[in-house]
Amino acid sequence: MTSPQIVQGLSDTIVHDEIVSARAPWLHHIAAGQTLHIIDLEGNQAVDFLLYASADDAERYSAQDTVAAQGNLFLRTGSILLSNEGRAMMTIVATSVDYHDTIGGACSCESNTLRYGHHTKHQHSCVENFLEANLTEGRGKRDIVPNINFFMNVPVEADGALGIVDGISAPGLTVELRAEMDVTAVVSNCPQINNPCNGFNPTPVRMIVTA
């Protein structure tokens, strides 16, 4: 397993440690009080992220409530991820990049085709990863809500337009999230190759849960 020094630097007990392959989905149950450490192993890799309340997955991450409550589109240390019930789901307790995206969304067959041409229709996408992971617990396409993009750089231009540009991460950089309730975290390790969000080369990430 790569980057053992990262594990050695964690003072809490490791309860889960997994490498998520490039382009792959991931799902894990995280108990209240545990911390999820997302590690960008090779740098410039976007990590698309959804949250569902374990007690009732009709309660799930809400981009609208989160953005409105903090008065900012970008997530930083101290940002609280709110549910559609207005409750705290997770808190970003530390991050080694300046900010994370809330509005860039997840790539899909449809968006790839619209943005990059019909020749991209066959390419794997984040929506497919979310579907694959969620189906294991009975959720479908209607349960995919606007997601977080950790490590992704989506600046808002003066005219309101969004850009998807080179990421702001580097090898070994992290974001750490403490669960404020029992949650199910769902990840798409973004497979996008048509824009620079992954440096045109999707790579693995590491997920460590500590207690």
Image: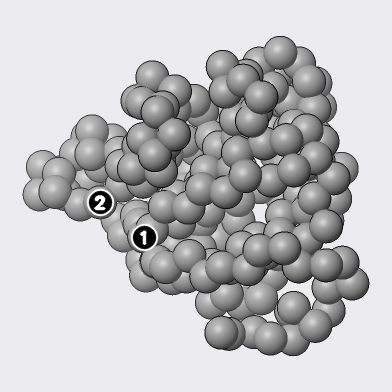
Say the numbered circle drawn on residue 23: 1
Picture coordinates of residue 65 (x, y %)?
Answer: 70, 18
| Amino acid at the residue labelled 1 | Arg
Query: Which of the 4 image quadrants contains residue 132?
Result: top left
The number of numbered discs placed on residues in the rendered structure image is 2
Disc 2 is placed on an element classified as: loop
Q: Residue at x 85, y 45 (%)?
A: 33
Colour basis: one colour
> Residue 8, relative to residue 64: is it above or below?
below
**Pointer 1 with pointer 2, Cβ within 8 A:** yes
Q: CA distance from mark 1 to mark 2?
A: 8 Å
Q: Quadrant of the C terminus?
A: bottom right
Say the numbered circle drawn on residue 98: none
Q: Nearer the viewer, residue 83 or 43?
A: 83
> Residue 122, relative to residue 66: is it above or below?
below
Q: Nearer the viewer, residue 3 or 67?
A: 3
Q: Is residue 190 left or right of residue 166?
A: left
Q: Quadrant of the N terminus?
A: bottom right
Q: Nearer the viewer, residue 5 or 138?
A: 138
| Amino acid at the residue labelled 2 | His
> Residue 143, relative to residue 166: is it above or below?
above
Tell me the residue that label 2 is attached to. 124
Q: Residue at x 47, y 70 (%)?
A: 204
Residue 40 in view in this figure: no
Which mark is first along the chain, 2 or 1? 1
Picture coordinates of residue 154 (x, y %)?
Answer: 55, 45
Q: Residue at x 51, y 28 (%)?
A: 146
